[in-house]
Amino acid sequence: MVPSMALSQGHQQQQQLDMPLDTVEKQLRNVIQTLYEAQVAISDYAGPQSIEAVQQQMNRLVSQYSELDKIKETLDVNIPKEIVVYVEDGRNPDIYTREFVEIVAKQNQFLNGKMRVFEDFRDVLAEQIKTTFPELQGDVEHVLRATSGKYKPKLEETPDPHIT
């Protein structure tokens, strides 16, 4: 498959996934607007005319919830339970995301530091083994090449053309 085709197909698949989410977002915005309008109608209660306006708002709300219920069948999105609990506790999911990214960045720095320490240890140990056990030098160099260590190939002794 041609890379541009793969990118195009991946983009199309992402768009197909985004379409139901966009629809849900739009529908949720409509629900919020209807709830706001119902709140205004209830707070401005002025007798029988207000009852009819509130009933219309409630009927619209029921139909919007019905639409949301239909849309759920087209979605295949897993939301981690931690995020649901976070939102249920009245906290902002954007803050959760930011905190999560910060934690991952700290863990990444920590693990990168550990990797560097192990790489340095590998290289120092290899040098010590080569010095102490010269007969193992070939094996040590093989291990260093296999683990991307600091491999110092022996320079072939070539005769110096200036020396006669």
Image (cartoon, rainbow, N blue to C red):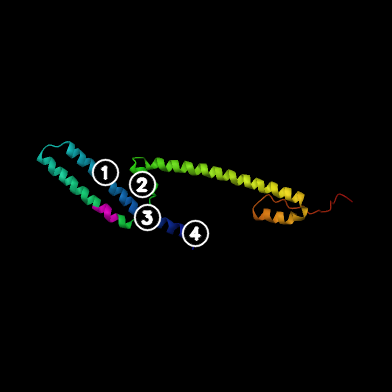
Q: Tag 3: Cα neighbours inside 10 Å, few (<14), some, or many (≥20)?
A: some
The circle drawn on residue 3 is: 4
Which of discs 2 and 3 lies nearer the camera? The answer is 2
The answer to if 43 sits in the magenta stretch is no
Q: Earlier in the sequence, mark 1 or mark 4?
A: 4
Which of discs 1 and 3 lies nearer the camera? The answer is 1
Alpha-carbon distance for marks 2 and 1? 19 Å
Q: Tag 1: Cα neighbours inside 10 Å, few (<14), some, or many (≥20)?
A: few
Q: Residue furthest left?
A: 48
Q: Is residue 95 above or below residue 76?
A: above
Q: Which residue is label 1 attached to?
A: 32
Q: Is residue 76 above or below residue 53?
A: below
Q: Earlier in the sequence, mark 4 or mark 2?
A: 4
The circle drawn on residue 115 is: none
Q: Position of residue 83 (x, y in %)?
A: 38, 46
Q: Earlier in the sequence, mark 2 or mark 1?
A: 1
Q: Position of residue 10 (x, y in %)?
A: 43, 57
The answer to if 70 sits in the magenta stretch is yes
Q: Pointers 2 and 1 in contact (CB under 8 A)? A: no
Q: Which residue is label 2 attached to?
A: 84
Q: Position of residue 63 (x, y in %)?
A: 21, 51
- For the residue labelled by badge 3, is the local secondary structure a helix, a strand or a loop? helix
At 22% from the left edge and 48% from the top edge, which residue is drawn? 61
Magenta range: 66-71
- For the residue labelled by badge 4, is the local secondary structure a helix, a strand or a loop? helix
Q: Residue furthest bottom?
A: 1
The one nearer the camera, 151 or 1, is 151
Q: Earlier in the sequence, mark 1 or mark 3?
A: 3
Amino acid type for the residue under numbered disc 4 = Pro
Q: Earlier in the sequence, mark 2 or mark 3?
A: 3
The circle drawn on residue 17 is: 3
